[in-house]
């Protein structure tokens, strides 16, 4: 398993452990100079989005993933976590509808989340 796929799996599993839902993984490597992948998921409320992000950081750090940029913990509405080649967006469900990142990056390769064993991907 390549490193990107392994890191994506770790992030998705950590999110799933905290009951995140509506997962999207986009390969933006051909259209973005800042990252290769976007992982987008939702939480029902601010407390849950913070818990999801904290779980991603905790499990990721145990596996050697360094999230060197973290933003949004103060409001819990849109949390960004950035690694060398993955940006994770943890949205409050209402905020996600407003920003609709998927439509902005529509030309990118949507990866099959089911291959990672995620239960709540829709």
Image (tube, rainbow, N blue to C red):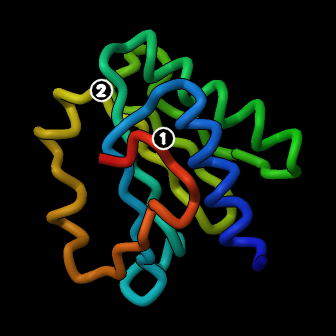
Q: Quadrant of residue 79?
A: top left
Give the residue at x 66% y 70%. 5
The reply to whether callout 2 and callout 1 are in contact (CB within 8 Å) is: no
Label 2: how many Cα within 10 Å (few below 14, some 14–19, many 20+): many
The mark nearer the N terminus, 2 or 1, is 1
Q: Name the residue under label 1.
A: 80
The residue shown at (76%, 43%) is 60
Q: Where is residue 112 in the image (x, y as percent from the top left)?
A: 42, 70
Indicate left or right for 94 with 34 as reference: left
Q: Kindly indicate the quadrant of the structure image that contains residue 55.
A: top right
Q: Where is residue 20 in the image (x, y as percent from the top left)?
A: 43, 32
Select label 2 or label 1 by which is in front: 2
Question: Callout 1: helix, strand or loop?
Answer: strand
Q: Residue 62 location in percent, x, y?
A: 88, 40
Quickly name the residue at label 2. 92
| Residue farthest to the bottom, as pictured | 30
Image location (x, y in percent) of residue 40: 39, 50
Mark on residue 71? none
For the point 55% across and 25% down, the residue is: 18
61 vs 35: above or below: above
The structure residue drawn at horizontal position 37% and vertical position 14%, both measured from the top left corner, is 46
Quarter in which the N terminus is drawn:
bottom right
Is residue 81 left or right of 91 when viewed as pictured?
right
């Amino acid at each position: 398993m390549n490193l990107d796929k392994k890191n994506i799996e770790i992030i998705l599993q950590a999110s799933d452990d905290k009951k995140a839902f509506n997962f999207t993984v986009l390969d933006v490597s051909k259209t973005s100079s800042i990252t290769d992948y976007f992982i987008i998921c939702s939480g029902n409320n601010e407390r849950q989005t913070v818990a999801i992000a904290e779980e991603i950081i905790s499990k990721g750090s145990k596996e050697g993933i360094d999230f060197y940029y973290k933003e949004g913990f103060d409001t819990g509405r849109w949390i960004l976590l950035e690694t060398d080649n993955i940006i994770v967006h943890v949205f409050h469900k209402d905020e996600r509808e407003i920003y609709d990142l998927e439509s902005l990056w529509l030309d990118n390769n949507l990866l099959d989340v089911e291959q990672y064993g995620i239960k709540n991907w829709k």
